[in-house]
Image (tube, rainbow, N blue to C red):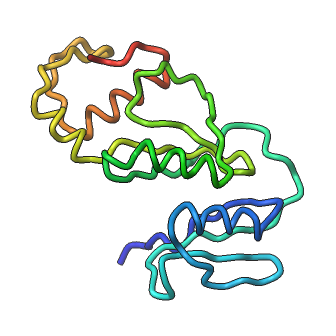
């Protein structure tokens, strides 16, 4: 049997403050609280939780791993405003402005994204024309996942987003 994801561990200077932000952001609850560890999740039977551990060193570079959050398409802008009111801030990491996600950072600077709901990407992918693969020059059909990946690659490596 393969291993399973248990916790997403987040380094924190202010364990209670950062755990409080994420419980409010996700609608989760504190599952255990110790001097050097706070675990949050949906409930005691949650298959995955977030664990906050103390650190003394400052965050100096962009995270190599981040969370992607989503909501309904109708609530997306309101949810971004709610996260900002909870203490998140907008994070500029080189976006061009045409991305299907919004980059935010939690109160300690850990980046996360609020992405468009999958159903909005599925409809978009079904009506998409074949695109030219910028690396191999091949014509490829963009389904939902390849569109999201190609959009990320285009953004990450400075190419214009596909239209």
Point 15% across, 38% down: residue: 123
Quarter containing the N terminus:
bottom left
Q: From the viewer's side, name the closer residue of 86 and 42.
A: 86
Q: Is residue 47 left or right of residue 40?
A: left
Point 51% across, 45% down: residue: 80
Question: Where residue 72 appears, x then y in whole percent?
Answer: 32, 52
- Height in image: 76 above or below 154? below
Quarter containing the C terminus:
top left
- Height in image: 7 above or below 61? below
Question: Where residue 71 appears, x then y in whole percent?
Answer: 37, 53
**Residue 33 occupies which quadrant of the picture?**
bottom right
Q: Is residue 140 left or right of residue 26?
A: left
**Residue 12 occupies which quadrant of the picture?**
bottom right
Q: Is residue 55 left or right of residue 155?
A: right
Point 45% across, 52% down: residue: 69
Residue extending farthest to the bottom is 44
Question: Where residue 151 appears, x then y in whole percent?
Answer: 36, 27
Question: Where residue 4 appears, x then y in whole percent?
Answer: 44, 73
Q: From the viewer's side, name the closer residue of 128 and 29.
A: 29
């Amino acid at each position: 049997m393969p291993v399973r994801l248990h916790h997403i561990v987040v380094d924190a200077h202010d364990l209670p403050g950062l755990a409080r932000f994420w419980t409010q952001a996700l609608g989760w609850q504190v599952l255990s609280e110790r001097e050097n560890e706070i675990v949050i999740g949906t409930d005691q039977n949650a298959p995955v939780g977030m664990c906050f551990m103390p650190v003394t060193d400052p965050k100096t570079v962009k995270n190599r791993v981040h969370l992607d959050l989503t909501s309904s398409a109708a609530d997306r802008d309101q949810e971004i405003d709610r996260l900002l009111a909870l203490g998140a801030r907008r994070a500029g990491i080189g976006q061009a402005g045409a991305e299907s996600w919004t980059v935010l950072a939690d109160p300690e600077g850990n980046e996360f994204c609020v992405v468009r709901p999958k159903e909005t990407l599925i409809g978009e992918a079904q009506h998409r024309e074949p695109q030219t693969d910028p690396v191999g020059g091949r014509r490829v059909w963009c389904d939902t996942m390849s569109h999201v990946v190609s959009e990320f690659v285009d953004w990450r490596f400075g190419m214009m987003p596909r239209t």
